[in-house]
Image (cartoon, helix red, strand yellow):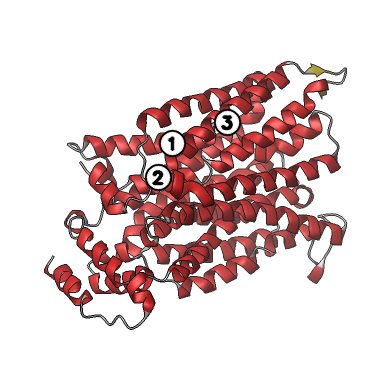
Amino acid sequence: MDQLSAVHKHSTQISTNHSFHRSGNLIFVIFVCLISSLGGFLVGFDTGVINGTFDGLYSVFDNNHIASGFNVTAILLGGAVGALSSGLFVDRLGRRSMLIVAANFLVISAWGAGITDASIGFILYRMLGGVAIGILSVITPIYIAEIAPSRYRGTLISLQYMAILLGLLFASLSNDLLLNIAGKSTELLWLDAEAWRWMFWIELLPAFLFLFLLFFIPESPRFLAAIGNQRAAHEVLIKLHGQTKAASVVTKLKSTLPLINQPIWTDVLQTGRKKMKNVLWLALTLAALQQLMGINVIYYYGAVLWQGVGFSEADTLLINIITGMVSIAGCCLTLVFIDKCGRKPFLIMGSMGMTLTLGLIVYAFANAEFGLNGELNLGAYDWLALISANVYVFFFSLSWGPVIWTLLVEMFPQRIRGLGMALSGCTLWLVHFAMIRSFPFLLTELGLAQTYSLYCVFTLLSVVLILCCIHETKRQTLEDIHQFCAE
């Protein structure tokens, strides 16, 4: 505590010759957030790139159904492992160091997935990539939240989700470009390697760029303060926000640093901290609901679904591009207004919009007919289903896609932020895996209308949850939010 007081006193002695020391350097803050958000781009790219490699994987690995399924979903299990393990190391190694670890894992995964000739090797490399994206999904919002000014924090954290959407889109465009050059994903391309291998190797370019740029960003000042390096934390705060703001943050840190030690898992479930446990369970519920709404079923199975109801393969490609653009449009609105309107209004609007559109999709599927060969025929309802699905994606990208990560990272105080986010991230990735694996079973046992009815029920429940349990956090410092949920 004496050291913090000395640092606070030292702040008045720092030169103010440069304007950004007085008012903060917003350009530098944005630069740092864009670099850290590049990890989100890699999350999207690494998740989406597999969609163009199926023919190549089948030709090389000769998989049975179960093995081929794990070729696709191994990355999701890796995401759960990465998210959970990040909680063990983030408060020991630091936020920036964990980003560097994840970047190295992505480089190894991208190279290995393209070079291996064994199914088990491919699954292990993809799981390593999954570990990386699990780490990034947890650490990136924590890092941005801890360096961003409170008045821009929602926008800057939401950059990560925008980057994920761009990564998904660029993976599709990259795969399509390589496919057009080679003719087929199984045809040889450069260096006598098949096109599907190059689809993975293309990721090496943004992965190496991400790794390189990470060495030009600072460590989180709140992490530095938490481990006792207050002088370094103060210097980073001045560089990010200016001398006056840095002094204010140092003052508020005085009330939180006595609570900070090396956290352990039991810290998030301490007896006597009922409000803290409530915050944890609310966070886990929010993370699970984000996936239970069925968003990734549309992303993963959309192409198969639209072809199944009568759209051509060319139509399906165009639909996927349109869906990607709709997602980006929704997220753009969030970037502009989240810090003006707040988190809660976006979540309510998104939940209500998704409930309505999923209801319309259910109505369309309930009125579908089956042909002689079992093919689904929506008849006059095909465009209703298609438009409703894209409006649903718009509402998700406007709300639960980007906003949920902002809200989760703001809910946890400094002392357990890493552990709380790790548990939330692990929950999200496990439910993501369960949703993708369960959809074919639900489709067979229940049918399309009933399956989408389940997703609609979850979106309706989310409306109630947001109205009853979520408190607005816009423009509050992390320390102010911490005072609300610490006891």
Q: Which residue is mark 2?
A: 408
How much space separates mark 2 and mark 3, taking CA atoms? Answer: 21 Å
Q: Is residue 296 visible?
A: no
Q: Provide residue 450's location: percent of width, then percent of height.
A: 63, 19
Q: CA distance from mark 2 to mark 1?
A: 8 Å
Kindly check if marks 2 and 1 are in contact, taking CB atoms under 8 A apart as contact.
yes
Residue 353's label in the rendered image is 3
Q: At which x and y percent is residue 404?
A: 46, 43
Task: Determine the residue positioned at 19% across, 37% down.
Answer: 271
| Quadrant (top left/top right/bottom left/bottom right) for the N terminus | bottom left
> Does residue 223 lie above or below 281 as drawn?
below
Q: Position of residue 352 (x, y in %)?
A: 53, 29
Label 2 CA crowd tier, 10 Å (few <14, some 14–19, many 20+): many
- Residue 141 occupies which quadrant of the picture? bottom left
Judge from the rendering whether residue 213 lies leftward or rightward of residue 183; answer left or right: left
Q: Residue at 50% of width from left, 43% of height from top?
A: 429
